[in-house]
Amino acid sequence: MDSVFLSAQPLGDWEFVWQQRQFFVEGTRIAVELTFYSIVLGFILGLPAGVVEAYGGPYSKGVVRPVGVAIRGTPILVIIAITYFAFGVSPAFLAATLALGVRSAAYQSQIFRGAIESVEGGQMEAARAVGLSKLDAIRHVVLPQALRRSVPGFQNEFTIVLKDTSIAYAIGVAELLKRSYDLFSLQTSAALEVFLAASLIYFVLTFSVNRGIEVLNDRVAIPGGNY
Amino acid sequence: MAENRLLDVVDVHQSYGEERVLEGISFEMDRQDVKVLVGPSGSGKSTMLRCINRLTDIDEGEIALDGESIYDMNQNDLRRQVGMVFQDFNLFAHLTALENVTLGLKRVRDMSEPDAVEKAARQLESVGLREQANSYPAELSGGQKQRVGIARALAMDPKLMLFDEPTSALDPELIGEVLEVMRDLAEEGMTMLVVTHEMGFARQAATDVLFLEDGELVEQGPPDQLFEAPEQDRTRDFLGRLTSLHGDQ
Ligand SMILES: Nc1ncnc2c1ncn2[C@@H]1O[C@H](COP(=O)(O)OP(=O)(O)OP(=O)(O)O)[C@@H](O)[C@H]1O
Ligand SMILES: [Mg+2]
């Protein structure tokens, strides 16, 4: 792991930020990785959860729903603390990924449930009328349409997860915010510059991913629109 | 049981919760019969069709396809043998016309991709849509969409085709092309149960017209008889109104 490079002479505050750019880059990389793995984990858990919420029987729904409500109702800092300190998951990066991923799953399940429910009932009916099993109908008819409709919802979800990676600093993950604190404690006069740099990085990431999602949304659109 | 019998509907009762919809419906269809089901809105026409492919379950009575109770059959197998065409098409919106037809061939009839594509292409051609095979539903006119819907059902090689107001969502100038496909189908000997207000189609293509009201079959018989000399006044009133609204096509 890299460490803060100490210079002999006092530097201007922006100079200081620039000199430590590698330190920011490393923090950014960790924030991006945390976001990526959390979103992926959230997808893997959230998609089936959304399907169950849309199509499940009373028992499966009876489990998935309350769990989702509980997770969404718990502050992310608490979820991270439970994962790391109570369940003892380690290293901290893994604990943060699990916590953010499970929390994201709880939210993604709602994106998917909403998207599934927005697909007209006639689609399922027509698939069943042809003789497809319910599972095949979900897989080949409802989900392909629902997934397309859930793409815009990921603009929010991605933004939230990215920003919340900063909370991983609480368990010592050297992501962007943690590093900003470290730098700030080295040169306290650079507080504004250091944290501005960090928020600028968050902004650039959020902005580009949101643009990317818009492009993806156009890419996967059904030709001619949704009739 | 007669060799030629395809469908028996015996004293069928059906309700949605408290609401009783079908109250003892009986009729039968021989192979190659084309029966037109008419009746006021809410009389249970759609429900009757949906009972036959088990999109809706019945409370009492019996429905048999080829002499076998539909409740003794595998549900997906039953549906493979009974094609259904919907009022608002219900084409799979994310699939091309061709893919709409191949999906069932691949997933239900376990055909290979090339076989399914070949059969689907022929099926689309038979409804006059060779050019539109790679169009998405949103890129098709209503009449074209409905013909894809018919091709999708026919591709499964059903024994019986159910049509639920197949032309009701269409602009008047597009109704003809769909009815033409249906008339051809009837001439080729397909067994068809059709809910429609198109009395011209009923006169030309139907072997029988069934008049349903308040969940009961009021009267059934060949179109000439029902149109010219119905036994019940209710039938005369209803068909008279229908013919003046949806004249002969
Ligand atoms: N899924 C459902 N749940 C509850 N009630 C229903 C349902 N589907 C239909 N009904 C009711 O059952 C009755 C018969 O409906 P059905 O759709 O079979 O009539 P219909 O003859 O096809 O009418 P239309 O000409 O308007 O299509 C109506 O009163 C309707 O409100
Ligand atoms: Mg109806």
Image (cartoon, coloured by chain):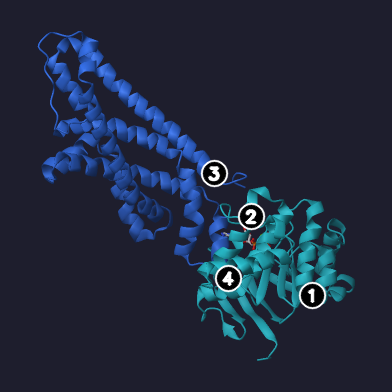
Chain colours: A blue, B cyan
Q: Is residue B220 above or below residue B245?
A: below
Q: In the image, residue A135 lies at what x, y percent?
A: 44, 63
What residue would you read off at disc 3? A221
- Asked if residue A174 shows in the view, the reply is yes
Discs 2 and 3 carry the same chain letter: no
Instruction: Identify the subunit bearing mark 1.
Output: B
Q: Which mark is residue B115?
A: 4
Q: Earlier in the sequence, mark 1 or mark 2?
A: 2
Tell me how far mark 3 sits from mark 1, CA to CA: 41 Å
Q: Earlier in the sequence, mark 2 or mark 4?
A: 4
Q: Quadrant of the N terminus of chain B?
A: bottom right
- Asked if residue A103 shows in the view, the reply is no
What residue would you read off at disc 2? B134
Discs 3 and 4 carry the same chain letter: no
Tell me how far mark 2 sits from mark 3, CA to CA: 16 Å
Q: Amino acid at mark 2?
A: Asn
